[in-house]
Amino acid sequence: MDDLISALAPGRVLTDPDVTASYARDRTFLQAGAVRAVVLAESRDDVVATMKWATANGVPVVPRGAGTGLAGGAVAGDGSIVLSLARMTRIVELSPADEIAVVQPGVITADLDRAARAHGLMYAPDPSSYEISTIGGNLATNAGGLRCVKYGVTRDSALGLEVVLADGQVINTGRRTMKGVTGYDLTGLFVGSEGTLGIITEATVRLRRAPATPPVTMAAEFTSLRDAAAAVAAIIAAGCRPSMLELIDRNTLVAIDDWRHIGLEPSTQGMLLAQSDATDGEESADRMTAICEEHGATFAARSTTPEEADELIAVRRMAYQAKERLGECLTEDVCVPRSKLPDMIAEIEAVARRHDVRICTVAHAGDGNLHPVFIFERGLPEPPPHVWAAADEIFRAALRLGGTLTGEHGVGLLKKRWLELESGPVVASLQTGIKQVFDPHNILNPGKAI
Protein backbone atom coordinates (compact mmCIF):
# COMPACT_ATOMS: atom_id res chain seq x y z
CA MET A 1 0.00 0.00 0.00
CA ASP A 2 2.90 2.37 0.69
CA ASP A 3 3.95 2.38 -2.96
CA LEU A 4 0.43 3.33 -4.04
CA ILE A 5 0.35 6.15 -1.49
CA SER A 6 3.71 7.42 -2.70
CA ALA A 7 2.60 7.24 -6.35
CA LEU A 8 -0.26 9.69 -5.74
CA ALA A 9 -0.40 13.22 -4.38
CA PRO A 10 -0.71 13.63 -0.59
CA GLY A 11 -4.23 13.09 0.68
CA ARG A 12 -5.40 11.05 -2.30
CA VAL A 13 -5.33 7.71 -0.43
CA LEU A 14 -7.44 7.21 2.70
CA THR A 15 -6.76 4.26 4.99
CA ASP A 16 -8.51 5.12 8.26
CA PRO A 17 -11.22 2.42 8.63
CA ASP A 18 -13.68 4.88 10.16
CA VAL A 19 -13.33 7.06 7.07
CA THR A 20 -13.12 4.40 4.37
CA ALA A 21 -16.29 2.66 5.60
CA SER A 22 -18.38 5.64 4.48
CA TYR A 23 -17.18 5.14 0.89
CA ALA A 24 -17.84 1.40 0.75
CA ARG A 25 -21.65 1.40 0.40
CA ASP A 26 -24.26 2.70 -2.00
CA ARG A 27 -27.91 3.52 -1.26
CA THR A 28 -28.97 -0.09 -0.72
CA PHE A 29 -29.24 -1.97 2.57
CA LEU A 30 -26.31 -4.19 1.55
CA GLN A 31 -23.42 -4.36 4.00
CA ALA A 32 -19.92 -3.66 2.71
CA GLY A 33 -16.71 -5.44 3.59
CA ALA A 34 -13.59 -3.97 5.20
CA VAL A 35 -11.77 -2.14 2.41
CA ARG A 36 -8.01 -1.60 2.26
CA ALA A 37 -8.19 2.00 1.15
CA VAL A 38 -10.10 4.66 -0.73
CA VAL A 39 -8.45 6.51 -3.60
CA LEU A 40 -9.81 10.01 -4.20
CA ALA A 41 -8.94 10.37 -7.86
CA GLU A 42 -8.68 13.88 -9.26
CA SER A 43 -7.31 13.04 -12.71
CA ARG A 44 -6.98 10.28 -15.28
CA ASP A 45 -3.38 9.80 -14.12
CA ASP A 46 -4.60 8.99 -10.61
CA VAL A 47 -6.87 6.30 -12.07
CA VAL A 48 -4.06 4.91 -14.24
CA ALA A 49 -1.66 4.69 -11.28
CA THR A 50 -4.30 3.00 -9.14
CA MET A 51 -5.16 0.40 -11.76
CA LYS A 52 -1.51 -0.39 -12.50
CA TRP A 53 -0.89 -0.92 -8.80
CA ALA A 54 -4.04 -3.01 -8.37
CA THR A 55 -3.17 -5.26 -11.31
CA ALA A 56 0.41 -5.73 -10.10
CA ASN A 57 -0.81 -6.66 -6.63
CA GLY A 58 -4.00 -8.55 -7.52
CA VAL A 59 -6.23 -6.21 -5.51
CA PRO A 60 -9.90 -5.73 -6.48
CA VAL A 61 -11.04 -2.20 -7.33
CA VAL A 62 -14.60 -0.95 -6.85
CA PRO A 63 -15.32 2.28 -8.76
CA ARG A 64 -17.63 4.79 -7.14
CA GLY A 65 -19.38 8.01 -8.08
CA ALA A 66 -21.81 9.67 -5.68
CA GLY A 67 -22.96 6.39 -4.11
CA THR A 68 -26.59 6.84 -5.18
CA GLY A 69 -26.89 3.42 -6.82
CA LEU A 70 -29.83 1.18 -5.91
CA ALA A 71 -28.55 -2.26 -6.97
CA GLY A 72 -25.37 -2.72 -4.93
CA GLY A 73 -23.04 -1.99 -7.81
CA ALA A 74 -20.73 0.17 -5.69
CA VAL A 75 -20.76 -1.98 -2.55
CA ALA A 76 -17.16 -2.94 -1.76
CA GLY A 77 -15.96 -6.34 -0.61
CA ASP A 78 -13.28 -7.27 1.91
CA GLY A 79 -9.75 -6.32 0.89
CA SER A 80 -10.77 -4.15 -2.05
CA ILE A 81 -9.89 -0.58 -2.91
CA VAL A 82 -12.67 1.92 -3.53
CA LEU A 83 -11.78 4.24 -6.42
CA SER A 84 -13.84 7.40 -5.97
CA LEU A 85 -14.27 9.58 -9.06
CA ALA A 86 -16.41 12.20 -7.30
CA ARG A 87 -13.64 14.83 -7.41
CA MET A 88 -13.32 14.66 -11.20
CA THR A 89 -15.91 17.38 -11.73
CA ARG A 90 -14.66 19.37 -14.71
CA ILE A 91 -16.78 20.17 -17.76
CA VAL A 92 -13.86 19.99 -20.16
CA GLU A 93 -15.71 21.39 -23.15
CA LEU A 94 -19.18 22.52 -24.09
CA SER A 95 -19.66 23.11 -27.80
CA PRO A 96 -22.95 24.75 -28.81
CA ALA A 97 -21.97 24.46 -32.49
CA ASP A 98 -21.58 20.67 -32.30
CA GLU A 99 -24.17 20.23 -29.53
CA ILE A 100 -21.82 18.13 -27.42
CA ALA A 101 -20.10 18.31 -24.05
CA VAL A 102 -16.94 16.60 -22.82
CA VAL A 103 -17.12 15.93 -19.10
CA GLN A 104 -15.32 14.13 -16.31
CA PRO A 105 -17.23 11.38 -14.49
CA GLY A 106 -17.79 13.29 -11.24
CA VAL A 107 -19.89 16.01 -12.87
CA ILE A 108 -23.35 16.13 -11.27
CA THR A 109 -26.03 15.40 -13.86
CA ALA A 110 -28.09 18.51 -13.09
CA ASP A 111 -24.97 20.71 -13.24
CA LEU A 112 -24.29 19.61 -16.81
CA ASP A 113 -27.90 20.32 -17.74
CA ARG A 114 -27.68 23.80 -16.20
CA ALA A 115 -24.43 24.53 -18.04
CA ALA A 116 -26.01 23.43 -21.33
CA ARG A 117 -29.11 25.58 -20.78
CA ALA A 118 -26.94 28.68 -20.64
CA HIS A 119 -26.40 28.02 -24.38
CA GLY A 120 -30.00 27.15 -25.22
CA LEU A 121 -29.26 23.41 -24.95
CA MET A 122 -30.01 20.66 -22.46
CA TYR A 123 -28.62 17.34 -21.31
CA ALA A 124 -31.65 15.10 -21.73
CA PRO A 125 -31.14 12.15 -19.30
CA ASP A 126 -32.54 13.08 -15.88
CA PRO A 127 -32.75 10.30 -13.29
CA SER A 128 -34.76 11.29 -10.23
CA SER A 129 -31.43 11.64 -8.39
CA TYR A 130 -30.14 14.11 -11.00
CA GLU A 131 -29.24 16.72 -8.36
CA ILE A 132 -26.86 14.30 -6.61
CA SER A 133 -25.97 11.53 -9.08
CA THR A 134 -22.93 11.81 -11.37
CA ILE A 135 -22.47 11.40 -15.09
CA GLY A 136 -20.03 8.54 -14.45
CA GLY A 137 -22.54 6.66 -12.35
CA ASN A 138 -25.28 7.29 -14.90
CA LEU A 139 -23.02 5.87 -17.62
CA ALA A 140 -22.09 2.86 -15.51
CA THR A 141 -25.72 1.84 -15.06
CA ASN A 142 -27.15 3.30 -18.29
CA ALA A 143 -29.49 5.37 -16.14
CA GLY A 144 -32.86 6.46 -17.44
CA GLY A 145 -35.04 9.05 -15.80
CA LEU A 146 -38.22 11.01 -16.22
CA ARG A 147 -37.53 12.36 -19.71
CA CYS A 148 -36.43 9.08 -21.28
CA VAL A 149 -39.90 8.44 -22.74
CA LYS A 150 -39.02 11.08 -25.34
CA TYR A 151 -35.22 11.37 -25.30
CA GLY A 152 -33.99 7.89 -24.42
CA VAL A 153 -31.64 6.64 -21.72
CA THR A 154 -28.03 7.59 -21.01
CA ARG A 155 -26.65 5.35 -23.78
CA ASP A 156 -28.64 7.38 -26.32
CA SER A 157 -26.68 10.48 -25.30
CA ALA A 158 -23.23 8.88 -25.02
CA LEU A 159 -21.05 9.48 -28.10
CA GLY A 160 -17.55 8.60 -26.89
CA LEU A 161 -15.57 7.64 -23.81
CA GLU A 162 -12.09 7.76 -22.39
CA VAL A 163 -11.61 4.56 -20.40
CA VAL A 164 -8.82 3.25 -18.18
CA LEU A 165 -8.60 -0.54 -18.45
CA ALA A 166 -7.79 -2.92 -15.62
CA ASP A 167 -4.04 -2.87 -16.36
CA GLY A 168 -3.88 0.92 -16.59
CA GLN A 169 -4.00 1.25 -20.38
CA VAL A 170 -6.06 4.17 -21.68
CA ILE A 171 -8.39 3.80 -24.65
CA ASN A 172 -10.80 6.11 -26.43
CA THR A 173 -14.06 4.80 -27.83
CA GLY A 174 -16.66 6.36 -30.06
CA ARG A 175 -16.51 9.80 -31.57
CA ARG A 176 -17.56 13.46 -31.45
CA THR A 177 -19.92 13.09 -34.39
CA MET A 178 -23.61 12.20 -34.38
CA LYS A 179 -22.93 9.23 -36.67
CA GLY A 180 -20.18 6.65 -36.83
CA VAL A 181 -20.01 2.90 -37.37
CA THR A 182 -16.28 2.18 -37.42
CA GLY A 183 -15.63 -1.10 -35.59
CA TYR A 184 -17.63 -2.59 -32.77
CA ASP A 185 -19.65 -0.25 -30.56
CA LEU A 186 -17.35 -0.23 -27.53
CA THR A 187 -18.99 2.93 -26.20
CA GLY A 188 -22.32 1.12 -26.01
CA LEU A 189 -20.60 -1.83 -24.36
CA PHE A 190 -19.05 0.23 -21.58
CA VAL A 191 -22.28 2.14 -20.91
CA GLY A 192 -24.20 -0.07 -18.51
CA SER A 193 -21.23 -2.32 -17.68
CA GLU A 194 -21.28 -1.21 -14.02
CA GLY A 195 -17.53 -0.71 -13.72
CA THR A 196 -16.71 -4.32 -14.57
CA LEU A 197 -14.86 -3.63 -17.85
CA GLY A 198 -13.05 -0.34 -17.29
CA ILE A 199 -13.10 3.00 -15.50
CA ILE A 200 -14.65 5.88 -17.44
CA THR A 201 -12.55 9.02 -16.94
CA GLU A 202 -14.10 11.26 -19.58
CA ALA A 203 -17.25 11.21 -21.69
CA THR A 204 -18.38 12.98 -24.82
CA VAL A 205 -22.13 13.34 -24.57
CA ARG A 206 -24.83 14.63 -26.86
CA LEU A 207 -26.72 17.81 -26.01
CA ARG A 208 -30.09 18.72 -27.44
CA ARG A 209 -31.93 21.94 -28.09
CA ALA A 210 -33.77 23.06 -24.96
CA PRO A 211 -37.52 23.54 -25.39
CA ALA A 212 -38.43 26.94 -26.81
CA THR A 213 -41.20 27.37 -24.23
CA PRO A 214 -41.52 26.08 -20.63
CA PRO A 215 -42.95 22.54 -20.41
CA VAL A 216 -46.60 22.11 -19.49
CA THR A 217 -47.51 19.46 -16.92
CA MET A 218 -50.74 17.54 -16.47
CA ALA A 219 -51.80 15.66 -13.33
CA ALA A 220 -54.66 13.17 -13.08
CA GLU A 221 -55.98 11.13 -10.17
CA PHE A 222 -57.61 7.71 -10.54
CA THR A 223 -59.54 5.39 -8.24
CA SER A 224 -57.99 2.43 -10.08
CA LEU A 225 -54.33 1.94 -10.93
CA ARG A 226 -55.31 -0.17 -13.91
CA ASP A 227 -57.38 2.73 -15.25
CA ALA A 228 -54.33 4.96 -14.93
CA ALA A 229 -52.25 2.40 -16.83
CA ALA A 230 -54.90 2.21 -19.54
CA ALA A 231 -54.74 6.00 -19.86
CA VAL A 232 -50.99 5.71 -20.41
CA ALA A 233 -51.54 3.38 -23.37
CA ALA A 234 -54.18 5.71 -24.78
CA ILE A 235 -51.90 8.77 -24.49
CA ILE A 236 -49.15 6.98 -26.41
CA ALA A 237 -51.60 5.67 -29.01
CA ALA A 238 -52.95 9.18 -29.54
CA GLY A 239 -49.50 10.39 -30.58
CA CYS A 240 -49.22 12.99 -27.81
CA ARG A 241 -45.40 12.55 -27.53
CA PRO A 242 -45.07 13.43 -23.82
CA SER A 243 -41.62 14.33 -22.54
CA MET A 244 -42.56 12.74 -19.20
CA LEU A 245 -45.22 10.18 -18.34
CA GLU A 246 -45.04 9.03 -14.72
CA LEU A 247 -47.34 6.85 -12.62
CA ILE A 248 -47.47 6.88 -8.80
CA ASP A 249 -49.43 4.33 -6.76
CA ARG A 250 -51.41 5.02 -3.59
CA ASN A 251 -48.85 3.57 -1.18
CA THR A 252 -46.26 6.00 -2.52
CA LEU A 253 -48.70 8.91 -2.49
CA VAL A 254 -49.56 8.16 1.14
CA ALA A 255 -45.85 8.19 2.04
CA ILE A 256 -45.43 11.55 0.29
CA ASP A 257 -48.59 12.95 1.88
CA ASP A 258 -47.51 11.89 5.38
CA TRP A 259 -44.23 13.72 4.78
CA ARG A 260 -45.18 16.78 2.71
CA HIS A 261 -49.00 17.01 3.10
CA ILE A 262 -50.00 17.16 -0.55
CA GLY A 263 -53.74 16.88 0.12
CA LEU A 264 -54.24 13.28 -0.99
CA GLU A 265 -57.87 12.29 -1.50
CA PRO A 266 -59.05 9.09 0.27
CA SER A 267 -60.32 7.58 -3.00
CA THR A 268 -57.16 8.17 -5.03
CA GLN A 269 -55.39 4.92 -5.90
CA GLY A 270 -52.99 6.33 -8.45
CA MET A 271 -51.73 9.56 -9.99
CA LEU A 272 -50.53 10.12 -13.51
CA LEU A 273 -48.13 12.97 -14.25
CA ALA A 274 -47.50 13.90 -17.86
CA GLN A 275 -45.47 16.70 -19.36
CA SER A 276 -45.07 18.10 -22.84
CA ASP A 277 -42.11 20.26 -23.89
CA ALA A 278 -43.28 20.55 -27.52
CA THR A 279 -44.12 23.86 -29.13
CA ASP A 280 -47.80 22.93 -28.82
CA GLY A 281 -47.34 21.94 -25.17
CA GLU A 282 -50.58 23.47 -23.93
CA GLU A 283 -52.64 21.72 -26.60
CA SER A 284 -50.83 18.43 -25.97
CA ALA A 285 -51.41 18.70 -22.22
CA ASP A 286 -55.08 19.43 -22.88
CA ARG A 287 -55.33 16.29 -25.05
CA MET A 288 -53.69 14.17 -22.34
CA THR A 289 -56.03 15.67 -19.73
CA ALA A 290 -59.07 14.76 -21.83
CA ILE A 291 -57.77 11.22 -22.40
CA CYS A 292 -57.36 10.72 -18.65
CA GLU A 293 -60.93 11.91 -18.05
CA GLU A 294 -62.15 9.49 -20.71
CA HIS A 295 -60.37 6.67 -18.84
CA GLY A 296 -61.97 7.37 -15.47
CA ALA A 297 -59.85 10.08 -13.87
CA THR A 298 -61.69 11.67 -10.96
CA PHE A 299 -59.56 14.79 -11.31
CA ALA A 300 -57.37 16.01 -14.17
CA ALA A 301 -55.84 19.41 -14.80
CA ARG A 302 -52.78 20.96 -16.36
CA SER A 303 -50.38 23.57 -15.08
CA THR A 304 -50.86 27.19 -16.10
CA THR A 305 -47.44 28.50 -15.00
CA PRO A 306 -43.89 27.08 -14.98
CA GLU A 307 -44.00 27.20 -11.18
CA GLU A 308 -47.09 24.97 -11.09
CA ALA A 309 -45.39 22.54 -13.49
CA ASP A 310 -42.32 22.37 -11.24
CA GLU A 311 -44.47 21.75 -8.17
CA LEU A 312 -46.21 18.81 -9.83
CA ILE A 313 -42.98 17.19 -10.98
CA ALA A 314 -41.51 17.72 -7.50
CA VAL A 315 -44.14 15.29 -6.17
CA ARG A 316 -42.63 12.57 -8.36
CA ARG A 317 -39.03 13.42 -7.52
CA MET A 318 -39.62 13.16 -3.77
CA ALA A 319 -41.07 9.64 -4.03
CA TYR A 320 -37.96 7.67 -3.07
CA GLN A 321 -37.07 9.85 -0.09
CA ALA A 322 -40.64 9.47 1.16
CA LYS A 323 -40.37 5.70 0.95
CA GLU A 324 -37.02 5.65 2.75
CA ARG A 325 -38.80 7.20 5.74
CA LEU A 326 -40.95 4.06 6.04
CA GLY A 327 -38.15 1.54 6.58
CA GLU A 328 -35.46 -0.30 4.68
CA CYS A 329 -36.07 -0.46 0.94
CA LEU A 330 -35.51 -3.19 -1.59
CA THR A 331 -35.83 -1.12 -4.75
CA GLU A 332 -36.42 -2.80 -8.08
CA ASP A 333 -36.95 -1.64 -11.64
CA VAL A 334 -38.52 -4.21 -13.88
CA CYS A 335 -39.49 -3.11 -17.37
CA VAL A 336 -42.20 -4.57 -19.61
CA PRO A 337 -43.61 -3.69 -23.03
CA ARG A 338 -45.87 -0.67 -22.64
CA SER A 339 -48.91 -2.69 -23.67
CA LYS A 340 -48.27 -4.99 -20.70
CA LEU A 341 -48.11 -2.21 -18.10
CA PRO A 342 -51.66 -2.85 -16.74
CA ASP A 343 -50.88 -6.57 -16.43
CA MET A 344 -47.61 -5.88 -14.58
CA ILE A 345 -49.36 -3.52 -12.19
CA ALA A 346 -51.97 -6.21 -11.49
CA GLU A 347 -49.17 -8.72 -10.82
CA ILE A 348 -47.51 -6.38 -8.32
CA GLU A 349 -50.78 -5.75 -6.48
CA ALA A 350 -51.51 -9.50 -6.31
CA VAL A 351 -48.01 -10.33 -5.06
CA ALA A 352 -48.28 -7.68 -2.33
CA ARG A 353 -51.54 -9.21 -1.09
CA ARG A 354 -50.31 -12.79 -1.37
CA HIS A 355 -47.14 -12.21 0.64
CA ASP A 356 -48.46 -9.45 2.90
CA VAL A 357 -45.66 -7.10 1.78
CA ARG A 358 -45.86 -3.34 1.60
CA ILE A 359 -44.91 -2.43 -1.97
CA CYS A 360 -44.78 1.19 -3.12
CA THR A 361 -44.66 1.52 -6.90
CA VAL A 362 -43.81 4.35 -9.22
CA ALA A 363 -43.29 3.95 -12.93
CA HIS A 364 -41.76 5.66 -15.90
CA ALA A 365 -45.03 4.64 -17.43
CA GLY A 366 -44.29 5.74 -20.97
CA ASP A 367 -41.40 3.24 -21.03
CA GLY A 368 -43.12 0.40 -19.17
CA ASN A 369 -40.41 0.76 -16.48
CA LEU A 370 -41.81 0.10 -12.99
CA HIS A 371 -40.08 0.65 -9.65
CA PRO A 372 -41.74 -1.57 -7.05
CA VAL A 373 -40.11 -0.78 -3.69
CA PHE A 374 -40.46 -3.44 -0.99
CA ILE A 375 -40.51 -1.93 2.50
CA PHE A 376 -39.18 -4.03 5.37
CA GLU A 377 -38.16 -3.55 8.97
CA ARG A 378 -35.31 -1.14 9.53
CA GLY A 379 -32.18 -2.66 11.04
CA LEU A 380 -32.46 -6.07 9.39
CA PRO A 381 -29.32 -7.08 7.46
CA GLU A 382 -31.41 -8.03 4.43
CA PRO A 383 -35.05 -8.48 3.44
CA PRO A 384 -36.86 -11.34 5.23
CA PRO A 385 -37.72 -14.47 3.20
CA HIS A 386 -41.29 -13.44 2.36
CA VAL A 387 -40.01 -10.19 0.83
CA TRP A 388 -37.46 -12.05 -1.31
CA ALA A 389 -40.23 -14.45 -2.34
CA ALA A 390 -42.41 -11.51 -3.43
CA ALA A 391 -39.51 -9.99 -5.39
CA ASP A 392 -38.87 -13.34 -7.08
CA GLU A 393 -42.47 -13.55 -8.25
CA ILE A 394 -42.40 -10.02 -9.62
CA PHE A 395 -39.13 -10.64 -11.53
CA ARG A 396 -40.53 -13.81 -13.04
CA ALA A 397 -43.78 -12.06 -13.94
CA ALA A 398 -41.88 -9.31 -15.76
CA LEU A 399 -39.95 -11.87 -17.79
CA ARG A 400 -43.13 -13.81 -18.52
CA LEU A 401 -44.69 -10.63 -19.92
CA GLY A 402 -41.76 -10.14 -22.28
CA GLY A 403 -39.87 -7.71 -20.03
CA THR A 404 -36.52 -7.41 -18.31
CA LEU A 405 -35.13 -7.57 -14.77
CA THR A 406 -33.75 -4.05 -14.83
CA GLY A 407 -34.56 -1.03 -16.94
CA GLU A 408 -32.03 1.43 -15.51
CA HIS A 409 -30.65 0.59 -12.06
CA GLY A 410 -28.38 -2.23 -13.18
CA VAL A 411 -27.82 -5.76 -11.89
CA GLY A 412 -25.20 -4.98 -9.24
CA LEU A 413 -25.38 -7.53 -6.45
CA LEU A 414 -29.14 -7.53 -5.88
CA LYS A 415 -30.26 -9.18 -9.12
CA LYS A 416 -27.40 -11.58 -9.84
CA ARG A 417 -29.33 -14.62 -8.65
CA TRP A 418 -31.98 -14.02 -11.36
CA LEU A 419 -29.72 -12.93 -14.19
CA GLU A 420 -29.54 -16.22 -16.08
CA LEU A 421 -33.35 -16.48 -16.08
CA GLU A 422 -33.28 -13.63 -18.58
CA SER A 423 -30.01 -14.14 -20.43
CA GLY A 424 -29.87 -17.93 -20.69
CA PRO A 425 -26.68 -20.01 -20.43
CA VAL A 426 -25.24 -19.17 -23.87
CA VAL A 427 -25.53 -15.41 -23.43
CA ALA A 428 -24.23 -15.71 -19.86
CA SER A 429 -21.17 -17.53 -21.20
CA LEU A 430 -20.58 -14.88 -23.86
CA GLN A 431 -20.79 -12.10 -21.29
CA THR A 432 -18.31 -13.88 -19.05
CA GLY A 433 -15.99 -14.15 -22.05
CA ILE A 434 -16.24 -10.41 -22.71
CA LYS A 435 -15.36 -9.73 -19.08
CA GLN A 436 -12.31 -11.99 -19.44
CA VAL A 437 -11.06 -10.02 -22.46
CA PHE A 438 -11.18 -6.67 -20.68
CA ASP A 439 -10.35 -7.82 -17.15
CA PRO A 440 -8.48 -11.15 -17.28
CA HIS A 441 -7.54 -11.05 -13.59
CA ASN A 442 -11.07 -10.13 -12.44
CA ILE A 443 -10.10 -7.11 -10.36
CA LEU A 444 -12.69 -4.64 -11.67
CA ASN A 445 -15.79 -4.68 -9.46
CA PRO A 446 -15.70 -8.47 -9.10
CA GLY A 447 -18.92 -10.31 -8.34
CA LYS A 448 -21.13 -7.64 -9.88
CA ALA A 449 -23.40 -7.44 -12.92
CA ILE A 450 -22.53 -10.69 -14.74
Image (cartoon, rainbow, N blue to C red):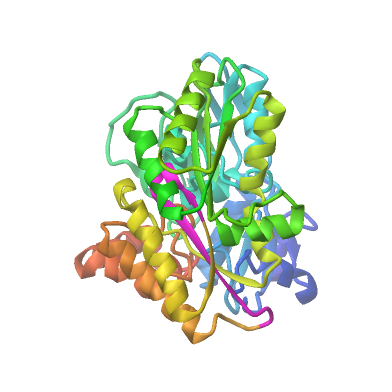
Main secondary structure type of the part rendered in magenta: strand
The residue positioned 33% from the left and 62% from the top of the image is 398
Q: Residue furthest bottom?
A: 385
- Whether residue 348 sits left or right of residue 181 in the image: it is right
Question: Can you give x and y, in whole percent of width and height, for residue 228 in the image?
Answer: 44, 47
Question: Relative to 84, does residue 212 appear above or below in the rendering?
Answer: above
- Whether residue 339 sits left or right of residue 358 in the image: it is left
Question: Relative to 281, does residue 76 appear above or below in the rendering?
Answer: below
The residue positioned 75% from the left and 58% from the top of the image is 259
Question: Can you give x and y, in whole percent of width and height, for residue 372 in the image?
Answer: 49, 62
Viewer-proximal residue among 192 and 153:
153
The residue positioned 80% from the left and 58% from the top of the image is 11
The residue positioned 40% from the left and 62% from the top of the image is 439
Is residue 173 visible from the viewing direction of this image? yes
Question: Can you give x and y, in whole percent of width and height, for residue 342 in the image?
Answer: 36, 54
- Whether residue 42 sits left or right of residue 145 in the image: it is right
Q: Quadrant of the N terminus?
A: bottom right
Viewer-proximal residue among 215 and 166:
215
* Magenta segment boundaries in residue numbering: 362-379
Is residue 166 visible from the viewing direction of this image? no
Question: Relative to 11, does residue 25 appear above or below in the rendering?
Answer: below
